[in-house]
Amino acid sequence: MLRQPCVAVAYSGGRDSTALLHAVACAAQAARTAEGQGDALHVVALHVHHGLSPQADAWLDHARATCEAWAAQGLPVRLLWRRVQVPQGPGLSVEAEARTCRHAALHEMAVQAGADLLLLAHHRRDQAETLLLQALRGAGVAGLSAMPRQDWRAGVLWVRPWLDHPREAIEAYIAQHGLRHIDDDSNGDPRFARNRLRLQVWPGLQAAFPQAEATLAASADRLADALVPLRRWQEAALAELGWPEDGTS
């Protein structure tokens, strides 16, 4: 039996992913109606339970309740979730380890659902912050290009459709549709680098340079464009030398 066409959305229950999931589910519903195919397309929300917060079980309950409520309203959406164990210990970055575990779980669930398209809700400010963080770590062109708009990973296309959208547009969407979302208390924890940047640096930066978000995100775009020919040149040069593409010999 052929599977129904399916698109996956990474869904934490937070503001950004709630807005994206709702928008995608509404678009899928409209496409069904326009094409006269009642079961043609469905959306699967992918939720990762990291177990790092005392609120993690409540967030999962919220994700379940939201998807069930929207499905009852006729939106073609359902929830898949997975619990992960994030390695912790001396020398390990909780942020990095959680991201690795989350990405692996999202990919596995997308494959399980039969989705070859996975959407993520990162927006323009996320992109600007990522460029700054990478610069502070001394990254090269690849790191400074920040988050890719789309990226094939083992048969699944990861896409960030809102990288040009300001956070304020997402907040307006949430308000317009009266959507409920969770607030992750860890977002206020200054132990994490992105939080320090967001809470302590970003307000002053934006006050001094109001266009910082847009210009930094645009710089990441230009660096991403430059990365493409650079990688092609590298591959051609290594091939000419008879070396493998990873540079090992």
Image (tube, helix red, strand yellow):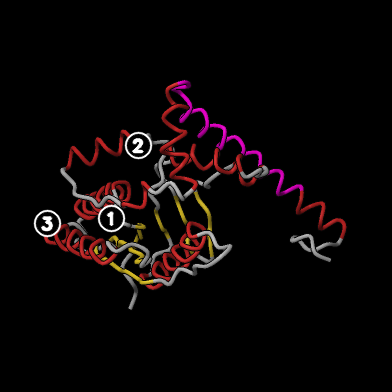
* Residue 22 image offset from top left, x and y in percent: 24, 50
Q: Is residue 15 magenta?
A: no
Nearer the observer, 232 or 126: 126
For badge 3, the amino acid type reads Gln
The residue tagged with tag 3: helix, strand or loop?
loop
**Of the residues under marks 3 and 2, which one precedes in the sequence?**
3
* Residue 73 image offset from top left, x and y in percent: 12, 57
* Residue 154 image offset from top left, x and y in percent: 54, 66
Single out the mark in the foreground, 3 or 2.
2
The residue tagged with tag 1: helix, strand or loop?
loop
Q: Which residues are magenta?
A: 208-233
For badge 2, the amino acid type reads Arg
Query: What is the distance, in whole Å, between disc 2 and disc 1 at their CAs?
Result: 16 Å
> Circle 1: is it few (<14), some (14-19), or many (20+) Cα within 10 Å?
many
Q: Is residue 187 left or right of residue 177?
A: right
For badge 1, the amino acid type reads Gly
Residue appearing at x 40%, y 52% in the figure: 120
Query: What is the distance, in whole Å, between disc 3 and disc 2 at their CAs?
Result: 27 Å
On screen, residue 182 above or below 197: below
Residue appearing at x 46%, y 50% in the figure: 191
Residue 73 - label: 3
Residue appearing at x 32%, y 69% in the figure: 81
Nearer the observer, 240 or 30: 240
Residue under label 1: 13
Residue 167 - label: 2
Residue appearing at x 34%, y 74% in the figure: 2
Q: Is residue 224 left or right of residue 81?
A: right
